[in-house]
Amino acid sequence: MTTPRILFAGTPEFARVSLAALIDADLPPVAVLTQPDRPAGRGRKLTPSPVRELAARNGIPVLTPRTLRDESIVRELDALHPDLMVVAAYGLILPQAVLDVPRRGCVNVHASLLPRWRGAAPIQAAILAGDKDTGACLMQMGPGLDDGPVHACRKLAIGKRETAGELHDRIARAGAELLLEKLPGILAGSASPVPQDAAGATHAPKISAADARLDWQRPAAALDRVVRAFNPVPGAYFMLGEERIKCWQAQPGPAAAAAPGTIVAAGHAAVVVACGEGTLHMTSLQRPGKRRVSAAEFSTQLDLPGRRL
C-alpha cells in the first residue's frame, strides 16, 4: 500500500500531540506548516513552536509562511501532491485555494463538541460556561469558521476542579486518537462526515488578559471558573494596590457580611474575598516577579484582612 502524502499544519502543544501520533503510526507528513518563531521567556528569545521542534527532530521539512494568501505558498503546497492536510491549532486562516490543494481536502482536530464552541478558545469557553462535558471533534474543513461536517467526536467529562491546562492535555490525546481512527476512511474517500446543526452553534473568541481579571461583583462560583479557565494562560488576576496578583487555585465558599472585594480572612487555609455572591477562597497566589506561594505564605508577606480589592 502506498504511504499517504499528508501535510500537517499546527503550532502549539495541542497540535504537537496529533503530529506525534502520526509519526508514531508511521505516517509522517511530507511537510509541516507552523507559525514563525516567536519571542518567549524573560529574554524574549526567538523560540520555535512545539510542532516545529518535533518536525525538525524527525527530519520533516518545515514551512513557516506568515500568510497563506500568497500564490507562491499555494504552488509550493501543490507541488507536494498531498492526499490530505491535517490541521490542529495552526493559527492562520486557510483560504479556499489552500483547502483545494489536497486530494481529500483538509481535516481539523478541534477541541470542543461541535457545533458548541467554534473559534479560538473552546477549552476556556467550556470551563467559563460551566459545561459538564466537552471533547474533541475531527471536522472536514470548509471556508467558514469551524462549521464543516464532522467525522467523529469524543466526549469527555470536565472535572469539577479541572483546569484548562489539565483539560487541554486530555482533549489533545482524544483528538489524536480520533485522527488515527478515522484517517483510513478519510484517505480512502469512504468517510461520510455529518453536517453540523447550526442552531446549536456557539462562539469561543480569542482570549485576552483582560478576560482573566477577577471581578468581585460576580458570584464566587463564576470566579472559580475564571481561575480554572485561565490556568495556565494567561492566569487569573486581581489588583492589590499597584500590584497585579495572580491566583492559580481557588474555590467558592459561603457568603460573608462584607462588600464585594473585601478580604475577610487571610491565613493558613486561604485568602478569602467577599464576592457578589459567596466568597472566593484563594489557595495559590503569585506576586509580580515572584514564585507561586500558598495562601499561608502569601498572608505573611502583606497586611491583608479588611483590605478592599
Image: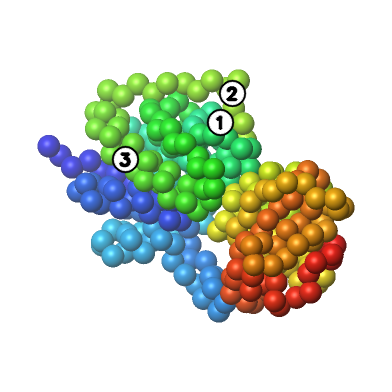
Residue nearest the viewer, comparing 55 with 226: 226
- Residue behind mark 3: 177
Cβ atoms under marks 2 and 1 closer than 8 Å: yes
Residue nearest the viewer, comparing 161 with 92: 161
> Residue furthest toward the right?
259
At label 1, the amino acid type is Arg
Mark closest to the chain's N terminus, 1 or 3:
1
Instruction: Left or right? Give the position of 90 relative to 298.
Output: left
Rendered location of residue 162, percent (x, y): 52, 48
Please report the residue visible at 19 percent of the width from the left and 48 percent of the height from the top. 26
Rendered location of residue 61, percent (x, y): 31, 59
At label 2, the amino acid type is Gly
- Residue behind mark 1: 116
Please report the residue visible at 77 percent of the width from the left and 46 percent of the height from the top. 255
- Which disc, if any, is residue 200? 2
Q: Quadrant of the N terminus?
A: top left
**Residues packed near mark 2 inside 10 Å, few (<14), some (14 to 19) or many (20 plus):** few
Please report the residue visible at 40 percent of the width from the left and 33 percent of the height from the top. 154
- The quadrant holding residue 131 is top right
Residue nearest the viewer, comparing 17 with 259: 259
